[in-house]
Image (cartoon, rainbow, N blue to C red):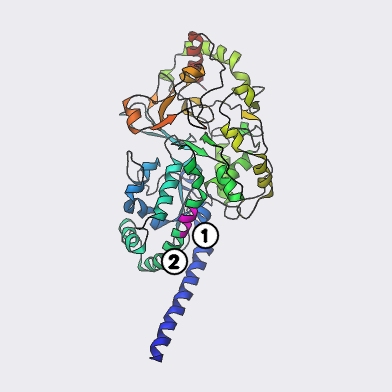
Amino acid sequence: MRRGVVIRIGIVVAWFVVLGIVGFLVTSRSDPETHADILEHYKYGSIGAESRSGVPASLWLALPEVFPDLLPKGPGQGYERVGLIYEKGHRRPIGTSFRRTEIGMVGLNCAVCHVGTLRASKDASRQIILGMPANQFNLQAYLNFLRAVGKDKRFNAATLIPAMKKVDPDFSRADEVIYRHYVIPRTEAALRQLNDDFSWLDVRPTEGPGRVDTFNPYKVILGISTGKTVGTADLPSLWNQRPREGMQLHWDGNNDSVEERNISAAIGAGASADSLDTPALRRVRDWILDLDAPRYPSRRIDKDLAARGSRVYAENCAACHSFKGKRVGKVTPIAAIGTDRERLDSFTKELVAKQGEGNGNLPKFKHFRKTNGYANQPLDGVWLRAPYLHNGSVPTLEDLLMRPRQRPKIFYRGLDIYDWQRVGFISRGTTAKRVGFKFDTSERGNGNGGHTYGTDLPASAKRALIEYMKTL
C-alpha cells in the first residue's frame, strides 16, 4: 500500500517537473521564421507579436476545423471568412507570422492590415497589392472568433487534439502531452482574458472590414477607461513613408515620427516592449520608406481630361494634399473640416500622458500629442485607398465630391471588385449586398459629413479632377 502511494506521489512530482520544464522551454526559446526576400518577410515574417498575443500554431490551424460555426458567414473557408488572404504554396495567410518556441506560435504582423486585393471585374483574377489598406480584413471578426472559441465547451483536449493531428502532420506524441496538460489550459485562460480585454467592442457599432479602433486597446493595456467614444478608423496605406517623416501622422496627426508610429503599430499587432523584434521591424521600415504606390492602369486614363484636371487639383487640392503643399501633413481643425469627430475625441490627453510613461508592455513614447482635428494626407495611390475620409464613410471619389447630403447613407464595404466609373470599390448593387458589410452612416463614428472642398465645382471640373487623381 505504502509502495503504491509513493509511486503515485512520484508520478505527480514528475508531472510537475515536466510541466515546469515545458513552461520554461515555451517561454525561453524564440526562433522567428525568417525570409531573405523582403516581400516574403513583409508578408510572413515575425515582428515579435507572438509572445503577448500569439496562438499556439497547431491549435491555431485547427480552430476553424473545430469551430466553423463561430466564424462569420461569407465566401471562402477557415480564416478566409475574416478576410485573410492565402497565397498558393503557403499554409498560413498573409499577415500571419510564426515564431518557434518548443510548440511554435502564430502571431500577426504589419501585412495583416496593409495588404489588399483588387479585381478588375467580378470574374477577373485577384491581384494582391502590398502596402495597400487591407480592404477585406475584418479584425473585429477575427478577435470575436477567438473570444467565442475560448468560451466554447468544445475547447478541450478531447476535441482539439484529434483536430490538431488532422491538420498538422508534424504533431507528435510529445506535442500531445504538452498541449493536453499545459498549452490548451493556458490558451483557454488567455482567450478568456482576451474576451474581457475586448468587451468594449460589444457596446460600439460593428467596425466591419478594412477598419480598426487603434487606441481603445491601448487604453486597456494602460488601465484607462475606454469611455464611450468610437475610435474606429480606416486602415491606411504604407507607401512612400520617407517624405512623410516629420508630417503629423495617424488620422488625427497625433505623432510625427515614422519610427515611433511603426513601433506603436507593432504594439497594436500584439508585440510588447520586451518582445518587439526591432531588426525585423526596421527591415519593414527601410522597405516602406521608398515603396511606391501602384499606378492606375494607364489605358483607363483619359490623358487630355487628366491634364485639365491637374489645373483643378492645383487650385483646389494641392496645398493640403500634394507632398510639397504648404499644409500637407498638418492638422486642419475639426471646426473647419467638419468630419465625424469620434475618432479625434477617442484619443485623449490622459492617453498621451500614459503613453509617455510606458509600462511593462509599452515603451515610453515621446512623439504623441493631442490635436484638435484631422491631418491633411498626401494622396499617393488614392485610387486604391477607398472608401474615403478617416472613417471610410464615403465609398468613391465621385461620392466624395458630392455635397454631404447627397453622399450614400448606406453602402456595402469589403468587396475588392473595382468601380472604374466612380473610382473606388463596388459598394452597391446585388453582389455588394450579398457579400459586403452594410455600412450605415447614421451610426456613431460613421458620419459622412464634412470635407466639402470641391463639392461646389461644376460637374465638368469634378470629372476632370477625378481623372487627374487617378494619376496620383
Amino acid at circle 1 = Ser
Q: Is residue 142 above or below residue 5?
A: above
> Label 2 vs label 1: CA separation?
18 Å
Q: Position of residue 370 (x, y in %)?
A: 67, 36
Q: Position of residue 338 (x, y in %)?
A: 59, 23
Quadrant, the N terminus: bottom left
State whether the magenta stretch is mostly helix, strand or loop: helix
Residue 348 on the magenta segment: no
Q: Is residue 459 above or below residue 156?
A: above
Q: Is residue 453 above or below residue 375?
A: above
Q: Mark 2 or 1, which is nearer the eye?
A: 2
* Residue displayed at 34% across by 46% down: 78
Write down the quadrant of residue 239 in the picture.
top right
Region rendered in magenta: 189-194
Q: Report whether 346 appears left or right of 46.
A: right
Residue 193 on the magenta segment: yes
Which residue, given by chain and number where applicable, does mark 2 sit on? Answer: 182
Secondary structure under badge 1? Answer: loop
Which residue, given by chain and number where applicable, does mark 1 sit on? Answer: 30
Amino acid at circle 2 = Tyr
Q: Which mark is residue 257?
A: none
